[in-house]
Amino acid sequence: MNDNLEPDETPSVEPTSVEPTPAESTGTEQVPADQATAPYPPAFAATPAPAKKKSNAAGMVAAIAVTALIGGASGAGVATWAITSNLNSRTTASAPAGPATITVNDAANATKITAIAATAGPSVVTVSVNAQSAAGTGSGVILTEDGYILTNTHVVTLDGETAHPTITVQTWDGHIYTAKLIGTDPITDLAVIKIEGTFQPLQFADSSKLNVGDEAIAIGAPLGLSNTVTSGIISALNRSITVSSSAAPKDGTNQTPNDNGSGPFNFWEFPAPGDNGQQQQAPTAAEQANIFLPVIQTDAAINPGNSGGALLDLDGKVIGINVAIAGTGSTSQGQSGNIGVGFAIPSNLAKRVAFDMINGGTATHGLLGATVMDVLGDSAIKTKTIVGASVQSVTDGGAAQKAGIRKGDIITEFNGLPITGSIDLTAQVRAAEAGSKATVTYVRDGKSTTVTVTLGELK
Protein backbone atom coordinates (compact mmCIF):
# COMPACT_ATOMS: atom_id res chain seq x y z
CA MET A 1 0.00 0.00 0.00
CA ASN A 2 1.24 3.42 -0.84
CA ASP A 3 1.57 5.54 2.18
CA ASN A 4 2.09 8.67 0.17
CA LEU A 5 -1.05 10.57 -0.50
CA GLU A 6 0.38 11.64 -3.79
CA PRO A 7 -1.96 10.76 -6.66
CA ASP A 8 0.94 9.57 -8.76
CA GLU A 9 2.24 7.15 -6.18
CA THR A 10 0.59 3.80 -5.84
CA PRO A 11 0.57 1.38 -2.90
CA SER A 12 1.44 -2.25 -3.09
CA VAL A 13 -0.91 -5.07 -2.17
CA GLU A 14 0.16 -7.39 0.61
CA PRO A 15 -0.77 -10.98 -0.31
CA THR A 16 -0.62 -12.57 3.12
CA SER A 17 -3.19 -13.88 5.54
CA VAL A 18 -2.64 -11.01 7.93
CA GLU A 19 -2.45 -8.40 5.22
CA PRO A 20 -5.39 -6.60 3.66
CA THR A 21 -7.04 -8.31 0.77
CA PRO A 22 -6.89 -6.65 -2.66
CA ALA A 23 -10.24 -5.09 -1.88
CA GLU A 24 -8.69 -3.45 1.13
CA SER A 25 -5.64 -2.06 -0.60
CA THR A 26 -5.95 1.57 -1.49
CA GLY A 27 -4.08 4.04 -3.55
CA THR A 28 -1.13 6.09 -2.62
CA GLU A 29 -0.96 7.00 0.97
CA GLN A 30 1.62 8.71 3.01
CA VAL A 31 2.86 7.05 6.11
CA PRO A 32 1.43 8.64 9.27
CA ALA A 33 3.77 10.72 11.28
CA ASP A 34 4.29 11.13 14.97
CA GLN A 35 2.17 13.26 17.15
CA ALA A 36 5.00 14.13 19.48
CA THR A 37 4.54 17.85 19.03
CA ALA A 38 0.78 17.79 18.78
CA PRO A 39 -1.21 19.61 21.49
CA TYR A 40 -2.43 16.26 22.80
CA PRO A 41 -0.41 13.15 23.68
CA PRO A 42 0.25 10.53 20.98
CA ALA A 43 -2.93 8.58 20.43
CA PHE A 44 -1.41 5.22 21.03
CA ALA A 45 1.37 5.43 23.57
CA ALA A 46 -0.79 3.40 25.87
CA THR A 47 1.97 1.46 27.55
CA PRO A 48 5.75 1.73 27.70
CA ALA A 49 7.34 0.92 24.37
CA PRO A 50 9.08 -2.25 25.54
CA ALA A 51 5.82 -3.79 26.69
CA LYS A 52 4.24 -2.93 23.40
CA LYS A 53 7.07 -4.46 21.45
CA LYS A 54 6.58 -7.76 23.20
CA SER A 55 2.97 -7.93 22.14
CA ASN A 56 1.40 -7.85 18.74
CA ALA A 57 -1.21 -5.34 19.80
CA ALA A 58 -0.35 -3.12 16.89
CA GLY A 59 -1.10 -5.88 14.44
CA MET A 60 -3.93 -5.53 11.97
CA VAL A 61 -7.20 -7.30 12.49
CA ALA A 62 -7.09 -10.37 10.24
CA ALA A 63 -9.68 -11.48 7.68
CA ILE A 64 -12.87 -10.31 9.33
CA ALA A 65 -15.53 -7.83 8.44
CA VAL A 66 -15.37 -4.41 10.04
CA THR A 67 -18.79 -2.83 10.18
CA ALA A 68 -19.85 0.73 10.85
CA LEU A 69 -22.11 1.27 13.81
CA ILE A 70 -24.72 3.54 12.32
CA GLY A 71 -28.18 2.05 12.59
CA GLY A 72 -31.05 2.14 10.15
CA ALA A 73 -29.54 3.93 7.18
CA SER A 74 -29.33 2.88 3.56
CA GLY A 75 -26.09 1.95 1.95
CA ALA A 76 -23.58 -0.65 0.89
CA GLY A 77 -23.59 -4.20 2.12
CA VAL A 78 -21.05 -5.57 4.55
CA ALA A 79 -17.66 -6.20 2.95
CA THR A 80 -14.41 -7.38 4.42
CA TRP A 81 -12.61 -4.44 6.00
CA ALA A 82 -15.22 -1.96 4.77
CA ILE A 83 -17.34 0.22 6.98
CA THR A 84 -20.94 -0.35 6.01
CA SER A 85 -24.12 1.00 7.30
CA ASN A 86 -27.06 -1.31 7.28
CA LEU A 87 -29.17 1.28 5.81
CA ASN A 88 -32.90 0.72 5.62
CA SER A 89 -35.25 1.99 2.95
CA ARG A 90 -37.23 4.10 5.37
CA THR A 91 -37.22 7.83 4.77
CA THR A 92 -37.10 9.14 8.33
CA ALA A 93 -35.11 8.22 11.40
CA SER A 94 -36.25 8.75 14.94
CA ALA A 95 -35.32 7.37 18.32
CA PRO A 96 -37.76 4.79 19.68
CA ALA A 97 -40.04 5.70 22.53
CA GLY A 98 -39.00 4.55 25.97
CA PRO A 99 -37.09 5.59 29.08
CA ALA A 100 -34.17 7.86 28.26
CA THR A 101 -32.68 8.23 31.71
CA ILE A 102 -30.56 5.77 33.68
CA THR A 103 -32.77 3.92 36.14
CA VAL A 104 -31.37 3.29 39.65
CA ASN A 105 -33.77 1.41 41.92
CA ASP A 106 -31.39 0.52 44.76
CA ALA A 107 -28.83 3.28 45.18
CA ALA A 108 -27.35 1.68 48.30
CA ASN A 109 -26.14 -1.31 46.30
CA ALA A 110 -25.32 0.47 43.05
CA THR A 111 -22.02 -0.41 41.39
CA LYS A 112 -19.39 1.98 40.12
CA ILE A 113 -20.66 1.35 36.62
CA THR A 114 -24.09 2.50 37.77
CA ALA A 115 -22.55 5.72 39.07
CA ILE A 116 -20.64 6.30 35.84
CA ALA A 117 -23.74 5.64 33.76
CA ALA A 118 -25.76 8.06 35.86
CA THR A 119 -23.20 10.84 35.68
CA ALA A 120 -21.99 10.36 32.09
CA GLY A 121 -25.35 9.39 30.58
CA PRO A 122 -26.59 13.00 30.30
CA SER A 123 -23.55 13.80 28.14
CA VAL A 124 -24.24 11.12 25.50
CA VAL A 125 -26.92 11.83 22.90
CA THR A 126 -28.81 9.99 20.19
CA VAL A 127 -28.22 11.43 16.71
CA SER A 128 -30.90 10.94 14.03
CA VAL A 129 -30.02 11.77 10.44
CA ASN A 130 -32.34 12.06 7.45
CA ALA A 131 -31.61 12.62 3.78
CA GLN A 132 -33.66 12.47 0.62
CA SER A 133 -33.60 8.69 0.34
CA ALA A 134 -31.88 7.42 3.45
CA ALA A 135 -31.97 7.72 7.22
CA GLY A 136 -30.11 6.41 10.22
CA THR A 137 -29.30 6.82 13.88
CA GLY A 138 -26.07 7.02 15.78
CA SER A 139 -24.67 8.47 18.98
CA GLY A 140 -22.73 11.54 20.02
CA VAL A 141 -20.70 12.92 22.91
CA ILE A 142 -21.24 16.44 24.24
CA LEU A 143 -17.92 18.30 24.06
CA THR A 144 -18.76 21.75 25.43
CA GLU A 145 -21.37 23.44 27.59
CA ASP A 146 -22.62 25.43 24.60
CA GLY A 147 -23.61 22.36 22.64
CA TYR A 148 -20.78 21.14 20.43
CA ILE A 149 -21.14 17.39 19.93
CA LEU A 150 -18.62 14.86 18.60
CA THR A 151 -19.83 11.96 16.46
CA ASN A 152 -18.67 10.03 13.36
CA THR A 153 -18.55 11.23 9.77
CA HIS A 154 -20.34 8.07 8.68
CA VAL A 155 -23.23 8.98 10.99
CA VAL A 156 -23.82 12.48 9.61
CA THR A 157 -23.25 11.51 5.97
CA LEU A 158 -25.17 8.23 6.24
CA ASP A 159 -22.10 6.31 5.12
CA GLY A 160 -21.34 8.84 2.41
CA GLU A 161 -24.88 8.98 1.05
CA THR A 162 -25.45 12.70 1.60
CA ALA A 163 -23.70 16.02 2.06
CA HIS A 164 -26.89 17.77 3.15
CA PRO A 165 -28.26 15.86 6.12
CA THR A 166 -31.09 16.92 8.37
CA ILE A 167 -29.82 16.18 11.87
CA THR A 168 -31.75 15.99 15.12
CA VAL A 169 -30.37 15.24 18.56
CA GLN A 170 -32.22 13.63 21.45
CA THR A 171 -30.69 14.27 24.86
CA TRP A 172 -30.88 11.97 27.87
CA ASP A 173 -34.00 13.71 29.22
CA GLY A 174 -36.00 13.26 26.01
CA HIS A 175 -35.59 16.75 24.59
CA ILE A 176 -35.12 16.98 20.82
CA TYR A 177 -32.94 19.61 19.13
CA THR A 178 -32.16 20.49 15.54
CA ALA A 179 -28.41 20.25 14.99
CA LYS A 180 -26.09 22.12 12.65
CA LEU A 181 -23.22 20.32 10.94
CA ILE A 182 -19.99 22.11 11.89
CA GLY A 183 -17.48 19.94 10.08
CA THR A 184 -16.42 16.46 9.05
CA ASP A 185 -13.00 14.82 8.97
CA PRO A 186 -13.45 11.66 6.90
CA ILE A 187 -9.79 10.68 7.33
CA THR A 188 -10.49 9.92 10.99
CA ASP A 189 -14.24 9.35 10.51
CA LEU A 190 -15.04 12.12 13.01
CA ALA A 191 -17.56 14.94 12.77
CA VAL A 192 -18.78 17.81 14.92
CA ILE A 193 -22.36 19.04 15.13
CA LYS A 194 -23.91 21.73 17.33
CA ILE A 195 -27.17 22.30 19.16
CA GLU A 196 -28.26 25.43 21.01
CA GLY A 197 -28.52 25.46 24.78
CA THR A 198 -26.50 24.70 27.91
CA PHE A 199 -25.38 21.11 28.43
CA GLN A 200 -23.13 18.88 30.51
CA PRO A 201 -19.94 17.97 28.62
CA LEU A 202 -17.81 14.90 29.20
CA GLN A 203 -14.14 15.10 30.15
CA PHE A 204 -11.51 13.32 28.07
CA ALA A 205 -8.89 11.00 29.54
CA ASP A 206 -5.35 10.57 28.23
CA SER A 207 -5.60 7.53 25.97
CA SER A 208 -1.81 7.18 25.92
CA LYS A 209 -1.96 5.93 29.51
CA LEU A 210 -4.38 3.06 28.95
CA ASN A 211 -3.51 -0.56 29.66
CA VAL A 212 -4.84 -3.76 28.18
CA GLY A 213 -7.24 -5.15 30.77
CA ASP A 214 -8.51 -1.76 31.97
CA GLU A 215 -12.26 -1.73 32.43
CA ALA A 216 -14.27 0.11 29.80
CA ILE A 217 -17.90 1.28 29.70
CA ALA A 218 -19.75 2.05 26.48
CA ILE A 219 -22.74 4.38 26.36
CA GLY A 220 -24.72 5.03 23.20
CA ALA A 221 -27.83 4.22 21.23
CA PRO A 222 -27.42 0.79 19.64
CA LEU A 223 -30.33 0.09 17.31
CA GLY A 224 -31.72 3.47 18.38
CA LEU A 225 -32.04 2.43 22.03
CA SER A 226 -30.90 5.59 23.80
CA ASN A 227 -28.73 5.49 26.92
CA THR A 228 -27.71 1.86 26.57
CA VAL A 229 -24.84 0.97 28.90
CA THR A 230 -22.48 -1.98 28.44
CA SER A 231 -19.15 -2.82 30.03
CA GLY A 232 -16.03 -4.84 29.35
CA ILE A 233 -12.30 -4.34 29.16
CA ILE A 234 -9.75 -2.91 26.79
CA SER A 235 -8.83 -5.96 24.75
CA ALA A 236 -5.94 -4.48 22.78
CA LEU A 237 -4.21 -1.20 22.08
CA ASN A 238 -2.61 0.14 18.91
CA ARG A 239 -4.78 -1.82 16.53
CA SER A 240 -5.02 -0.59 12.94
CA ILE A 241 -8.05 -1.10 10.73
CA THR A 242 -9.00 0.02 7.25
CA VAL A 243 -12.58 0.94 6.42
CA SER A 244 -14.45 2.61 3.58
CA SER A 245 -14.41 6.39 3.61
CA SER A 246 -17.72 8.06 4.41
CA ALA A 247 -16.82 11.40 2.87
CA ALA A 248 -19.90 13.19 1.59
CA PRO A 249 -20.56 12.92 -2.16
CA LYS A 250 -19.08 15.73 -4.21
CA ASP A 251 -21.10 15.54 -7.41
CA GLY A 252 -24.06 17.68 -8.44
CA THR A 253 -26.01 19.22 -5.59
CA ASN A 254 -24.49 16.94 -2.98
CA GLN A 255 -21.33 18.91 -2.28
CA THR A 256 -19.07 18.21 0.65
CA PRO A 257 -20.10 20.44 3.57
CA ASN A 258 -18.12 23.62 4.18
CA ASP A 259 -15.87 23.29 1.13
CA ASN A 260 -18.14 23.42 -1.93
CA GLY A 261 -16.79 20.06 -2.96
CA SER A 262 -13.17 21.13 -3.44
CA GLY A 263 -11.40 20.09 -0.23
CA PRO A 264 -9.89 20.48 2.27
CA PHE A 265 -9.30 16.74 1.96
CA ASN A 266 -9.09 15.06 -1.43
CA PHE A 267 -10.15 11.64 -0.27
CA TRP A 268 -10.48 10.35 -3.79
CA GLU A 269 -6.71 10.19 -4.18
CA PHE A 270 -7.03 6.71 -2.73
CA PRO A 271 -7.75 4.18 -5.49
CA ALA A 272 -10.95 2.25 -4.94
CA PRO A 273 -10.69 -1.35 -3.71
CA GLY A 274 -9.47 -3.77 -6.34
CA ASP A 275 -7.73 -1.32 -8.67
CA ASN A 276 -4.22 -2.31 -7.56
CA GLY A 277 -3.26 1.27 -6.85
CA GLN A 278 -3.64 2.70 -10.33
CA GLN A 279 -4.48 6.39 -10.58
CA GLN A 280 -8.11 7.02 -11.43
CA GLN A 281 -10.87 9.59 -11.53
CA ALA A 282 -12.87 10.46 -8.43
CA PRO A 283 -15.07 7.45 -7.59
CA THR A 284 -18.79 7.63 -7.11
CA ALA A 285 -20.37 7.24 -3.67
CA ALA A 286 -20.57 3.50 -4.32
CA GLU A 287 -16.85 3.36 -5.13
CA GLN A 288 -15.63 4.81 -1.88
CA ALA A 289 -11.95 4.97 -1.02
CA ASN A 290 -10.46 3.51 2.11
CA ILE A 291 -9.21 5.22 5.24
CA PHE A 292 -6.89 3.91 7.93
CA LEU A 293 -7.66 4.22 11.62
CA PRO A 294 -5.62 3.54 14.76
CA VAL A 295 -8.08 2.13 17.29
CA ILE A 296 -8.62 0.75 20.76
CA GLN A 297 -10.16 -2.73 20.80
CA THR A 298 -12.78 -3.53 23.44
CA ASP A 299 -15.11 -6.41 24.29
CA ALA A 300 -17.74 -4.06 25.72
CA ALA A 301 -20.83 -4.82 23.66
CA ILE A 302 -21.35 -2.25 20.91
CA ASN A 303 -23.69 -2.56 17.96
CA PRO A 304 -24.98 -0.53 15.00
CA GLY A 305 -26.17 2.78 16.44
CA ASN A 306 -23.27 3.00 18.91
CA SER A 307 -21.24 4.98 16.36
CA GLY A 308 -20.07 8.27 17.83
CA GLY A 309 -20.86 7.19 21.38
CA ALA A 310 -18.53 7.17 24.35
CA LEU A 311 -16.11 4.55 25.57
CA LEU A 312 -15.35 5.51 29.18
CA ASP A 313 -12.90 4.62 31.93
CA LEU A 314 -13.79 4.05 35.58
CA ASP A 315 -13.51 7.78 36.23
CA GLY A 316 -16.28 8.41 33.72
CA LYS A 317 -13.89 10.07 31.28
CA VAL A 318 -13.86 9.45 27.53
CA ILE A 319 -11.10 7.12 26.40
CA GLY A 320 -12.49 6.55 22.92
CA ILE A 321 -15.25 7.26 20.40
CA ASN A 322 -16.91 4.04 19.25
CA VAL A 323 -16.60 3.63 15.51
CA ALA A 324 -16.81 0.04 14.23
CA ILE A 325 -17.21 -3.61 15.08
CA ALA A 326 -15.67 -6.74 13.62
CA GLY A 327 -17.78 -9.66 12.56
CA THR A 328 -17.46 -13.00 10.85
CA GLY A 329 -20.30 -12.18 8.49
CA SER A 330 -23.55 -10.28 8.22
CA THR A 331 -27.19 -10.86 8.95
CA SER A 332 -29.88 -11.17 6.32
CA GLN A 333 -30.43 -7.44 6.76
CA GLY A 334 -26.80 -6.75 5.88
CA GLN A 335 -25.76 -5.93 9.43
CA SER A 336 -23.32 -7.65 11.69
CA GLY A 337 -23.95 -7.68 15.42
CA ASN A 338 -21.67 -7.65 18.43
CA ILE A 339 -19.24 -10.56 18.82
CA GLY A 340 -17.12 -8.88 21.46
CA VAL A 341 -14.68 -7.23 19.07
CA GLY A 342 -15.36 -3.51 18.92
CA PHE A 343 -13.20 -0.53 18.01
CA ALA A 344 -12.97 3.03 19.26
CA ILE A 345 -10.96 6.04 18.09
CA PRO A 346 -8.58 6.95 20.95
CA SER A 347 -9.57 10.02 22.93
CA ASN A 348 -6.33 11.90 22.26
CA LEU A 349 -6.85 11.71 18.52
CA ALA A 350 -10.59 12.39 18.77
CA LYS A 351 -10.06 15.44 20.99
CA ARG A 352 -7.42 16.96 18.72
CA VAL A 353 -9.48 16.54 15.57
CA ALA A 354 -12.70 17.74 17.22
CA PHE A 355 -11.26 20.96 18.56
CA ASP A 356 -9.36 21.60 15.34
CA MET A 357 -12.74 21.53 13.59
CA ILE A 358 -14.38 23.72 16.22
CA ASN A 359 -11.56 26.27 16.31
CA GLY A 360 -10.23 26.27 12.78
CA GLY A 361 -12.69 24.44 10.59
CA THR A 362 -10.34 21.61 9.56
CA ALA A 363 -7.96 19.11 11.11
CA THR A 364 -4.52 18.40 9.68
CA HIS A 365 -2.92 15.02 9.07
CA GLY A 366 0.69 13.94 8.70
CA LEU A 367 2.42 12.88 5.51
CA LEU A 368 5.62 10.82 5.49
CA GLY A 369 6.32 10.88 1.78
CA ALA A 370 7.06 7.18 1.36
CA THR A 371 5.43 4.35 -0.54
CA VAL A 372 5.33 1.22 1.61
CA MET A 373 4.08 -2.35 1.61
CA ASP A 374 4.07 -5.20 4.09
CA VAL A 375 7.35 -7.06 4.44
CA LEU A 376 5.52 -10.38 4.14
CA GLY A 377 4.22 -9.35 0.73
CA ASP A 378 7.47 -7.91 -0.60
CA SER A 379 8.95 -10.38 -3.06
CA ALA A 380 12.17 -8.35 -3.19
CA ILE A 381 12.96 -9.46 0.37
CA LYS A 382 14.08 -13.06 -0.07
CA THR A 383 14.71 -13.86 3.59
CA LYS A 384 12.10 -12.41 5.90
CA THR A 385 13.15 -12.24 9.54
CA ILE A 386 11.07 -9.30 10.84
CA VAL A 387 7.70 -7.75 10.16
CA GLY A 388 7.28 -4.11 9.26
CA ALA A 389 6.56 -1.68 6.45
CA SER A 390 8.94 -2.09 3.53
CA VAL A 391 9.81 1.21 1.83
CA GLN A 392 9.28 0.98 -1.93
CA SER A 393 10.07 4.60 -2.77
CA VAL A 394 10.38 8.03 -1.17
CA THR A 395 9.17 11.39 -2.43
CA ASP A 396 11.86 13.86 -3.43
CA GLY A 397 12.05 16.52 -0.75
CA GLY A 398 9.53 14.67 1.42
CA ALA A 399 9.72 14.06 5.14
CA ALA A 400 11.10 10.53 4.82
CA GLN A 401 13.85 11.49 2.37
CA LYS A 402 14.91 14.46 4.51
CA ALA A 403 15.28 12.11 7.49
CA GLY A 404 17.51 9.73 5.53
CA ILE A 405 14.94 6.98 4.94
CA ARG A 406 15.32 5.31 1.56
CA LYS A 407 14.03 2.50 -0.62
CA GLY A 408 14.65 -0.93 0.89
CA ASP A 409 14.43 0.19 4.51
CA ILE A 410 12.00 -1.67 6.77
CA ILE A 411 10.11 0.59 9.18
CA THR A 412 9.49 -1.26 12.45
CA GLU A 413 8.45 1.49 14.88
CA PHE A 414 6.68 4.82 14.76
CA ASN A 415 6.84 6.98 17.88
CA GLY A 416 7.85 3.93 19.87
CA LEU A 417 4.89 1.87 18.64
CA PRO A 418 5.50 -1.41 16.80
CA ILE A 419 4.74 -1.34 13.07
CA THR A 420 3.75 -4.70 11.62
CA GLY A 421 2.86 -3.50 8.13
CA SER A 422 1.69 -0.74 5.84
CA ILE A 423 -1.72 -0.29 7.47
CA ASP A 424 -0.15 0.24 10.89
CA LEU A 425 2.20 2.86 9.51
CA THR A 426 -0.44 4.64 7.47
CA ALA A 427 -2.88 4.77 10.37
CA GLN A 428 -0.31 6.26 12.72
CA VAL A 429 0.89 8.83 10.20
CA ARG A 430 -2.69 9.90 9.43
CA ALA A 431 -3.39 10.29 13.15
CA ALA A 432 -0.46 12.65 13.58
CA GLU A 433 -0.71 16.38 13.13
CA ALA A 434 0.89 17.96 10.07
CA GLY A 435 4.22 19.53 10.93
CA SER A 436 4.66 17.43 14.07
CA LYS A 437 7.85 15.52 14.78
CA ALA A 438 7.88 11.75 14.96
CA THR A 439 10.50 9.12 15.68
CA VAL A 440 10.81 6.43 13.05
CA THR A 441 12.85 3.26 13.54
CA TYR A 442 13.94 1.36 10.45
CA VAL A 443 16.17 -1.59 9.69
CA ARG A 444 18.76 -1.41 6.89
CA ASP A 445 21.24 -4.21 6.22
CA GLY A 446 20.35 -5.77 9.57
CA LYS A 447 21.05 -2.60 11.53
CA SER A 448 18.33 -0.69 13.38
CA THR A 449 18.34 3.12 13.23
CA THR A 450 15.98 5.67 14.79
CA VAL A 451 15.52 9.09 13.21
CA THR A 452 13.31 12.10 13.88
CA VAL A 453 10.98 13.04 11.05
CA THR A 454 9.11 16.32 10.61
CA LEU A 455 5.89 15.27 8.93
CA GLY A 456 4.47 16.96 5.90
CA GLU A 457 0.79 17.71 5.45
CA LEU A 458 -1.75 15.49 3.79
CA LYS A 459 -3.69 17.52 1.24
Image: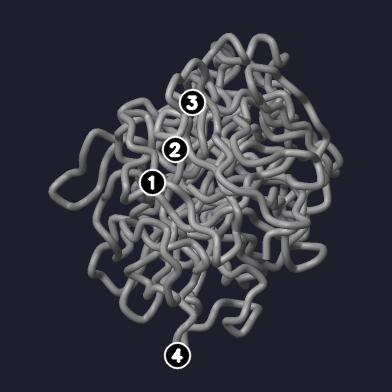
Q: Residue at x 45, y 75 (%)?
A: 282
Nearer to me, 289 or 375: 375
Question: Is disc 3 placed on a helix, strand or loop?
Answer: loop
Residue 206 sits above or below residue 75 on the image: above
What is the distance, in whole Å, between disc 1 and disc 4 at their CAs? 35 Å
Tell me the quarter of the picture where residue 137 sits.
bottom left
Q: Considering only order in the chain, which callout, 3 or 1, is on the residue closer to the N terminus?
A: 3
Q: Which residue is mark 4?
A: 252
Nearer to me, 380 or 328: 380
Question: Is disc 1 placed on a helix, strand or loop?
Answer: loop
Q: Considering only order in the chain, which callout, 4 or 2, is on the residue closer to the N terminus?
A: 2
Question: Is disc 4 placed on a helix, strand or loop?
Answer: loop
Nearer to me, 406 or 70: 406
The circle on residue 228 is: 2
Nearer to me, 191 or 349: 349
- Left or right: 427 in relation to 209: left
Q: Amino acid at mark 4?
A: Gly
Residue 439 sits above or below residue 12 on the image: above
- Left or right: 275 in relation to 46: left
- Left or right: 374 in relation to 202: left
Q: Are marks 1 and 2 in contact (CB under 8 Å)?
A: yes
Marks 2 and 4: which is nearer the front? 4
What is the distance, in whole Å, between disc 1 and disc 3 at their CAs? 33 Å
Horizontal and vertical percent position of residue 36: 82, 36
Question: Is disc 2 placed on a helix, strand or loop?
Answer: strand
Q: Amino acid at mark 1?
A: Leu
Q: What crowding class fits label 3: few (fewer than 14 Cα within 10 Å), some (14-19), or many (20 or more)?
A: many
Q: Amino acid at mark 3?
A: Gly
Q: Which residue is mark 1?
A: 225
